[in-house]
Image (cartoon, rainbow, N blue to C red):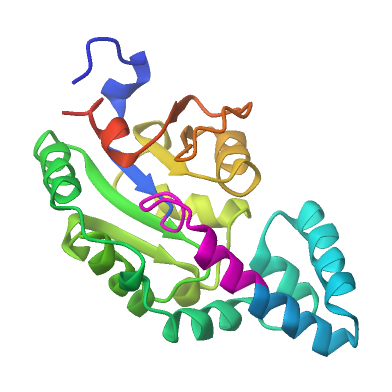
């Protein structure tokens, strides 16, 4: 454990993770592919030039703070959009498994900290494929809440409530780790959860999170 830890670290028994952009870093080439497919679909649906379709998406995202919710609002099936995308996209072509990450997850678990996943726009199959690409065994996670299975999406309160309503842990024993301020941090914080912002790119943005880190390893060092 780090020499100087936030006082609340000691009470945490469940570390709940977002997946995309949190357990692995943002990758511009992947984001660009997702955006290209997304904007092309919006342009076709609304019969707009690509530039106006992009502006339409950006405007709606600022209001809804979730790509899935934007696409649902447009009657495009946001959940299915990502299910289809990830079925045809191999993350392992862009990222290499990290054996050290698996080991530090195991060490935190040995210290009495369980792990869970709470992720949007993923099915259990896509979660398993992504964890394999990262180098993490699904068995490390005592609970996996994938919106493709549950139908419950962040940033709604119902998504986060699963963490204490469907696990043996109290709210004050849970920390949520995510990379998006409005999708992950603010709604979790509003419910009373401790929060950690994953800032892979060291953007130094202002955050309401209780802690800011730059990698999963940096965070888990507080727990081992």
Query: Which residue is rendered at x = 30% and y = 31% of the image?
Result: 218
Task: Locate residue 72 relative to residue 46 in the image: left or right.
Answer: left
Task: Locate residue 12 relative to residue 181 in the image: left or right.
Answer: left
Q: Is residue 101 above or below residue 173?
A: below
**Which span is picked out in magenta?**
19-35
Query: Which residue is rendered at x = 57% and y = 83% of the image?
Result: 80
Number of dots carrying numbers: 0
Which quarter of the figure is the N terminus placed in?
top left
**Residue 86 included in the magenta stretch of the image:** no
Q: Position of residue 192 (x, y in %)?
A: 53, 32
Q: Is residue 33 above or below residue 166?
A: below
Confirm whether residue 75 shows in the render.
no
Confirm whether residue 16 shows in the render.
yes
Q: Position of residue 131 (x, y in %)?
A: 28, 64
Query: Which residue is rendered at x = 48% and y = 37% of the image?
Result: 199
Q: Nearer the viewer, residue 112 or 206?
A: 206
Q: Nearer the viewer, residue 149 or 64?
A: 64
Q: Is residue 84 above or below residue 58?
A: below
């Amino acid at each position: 454990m780090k020499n100087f830890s936030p006082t609340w670290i000691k009470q945490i028994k469940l570390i709940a993770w977002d997946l995309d952009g949190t357990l692995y870093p943002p990758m511009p080439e992947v984001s660009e592919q997702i955006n290209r497919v997304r904007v092309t679909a919006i342009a076709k649906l609304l019969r707009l030039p690509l530039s106006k379709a992009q502006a339409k998406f950006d405007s709606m995202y600022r209001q809804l703070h979730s790509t899935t919710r934007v696409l649902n609002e447009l009657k495009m099936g946001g959940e299915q959009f990502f299910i289809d995308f990830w079925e045809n996209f191999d993350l392992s072509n862009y990222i290499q498994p990290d054996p050290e990450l698996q080991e530090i997850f195991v060490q935190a678990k040995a210290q009495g900290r369980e792990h869970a996943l709470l992720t949007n726009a993923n099915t259990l199959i896509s979660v398993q494929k992504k964890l394999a690409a990262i180098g993490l065994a699904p068995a490390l996670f005592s609970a996996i809440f994938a919106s493709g299975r549950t139908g419950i999406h962040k940033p709604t309160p119902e998504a986060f409530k699963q963490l204490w309503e469907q696990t043996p842990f109290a709210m004050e024993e849970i920390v949520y780790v995510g990379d998006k301020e409005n999708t992950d941090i603010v709604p979790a914080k509003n419910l009373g959860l401790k929060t950690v912002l994953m800032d892979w790119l060291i953007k130094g943005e202002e955050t309401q999170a209780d802690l800011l880190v730059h990698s999963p390893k940096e965070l888990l060092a507080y727990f081992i």
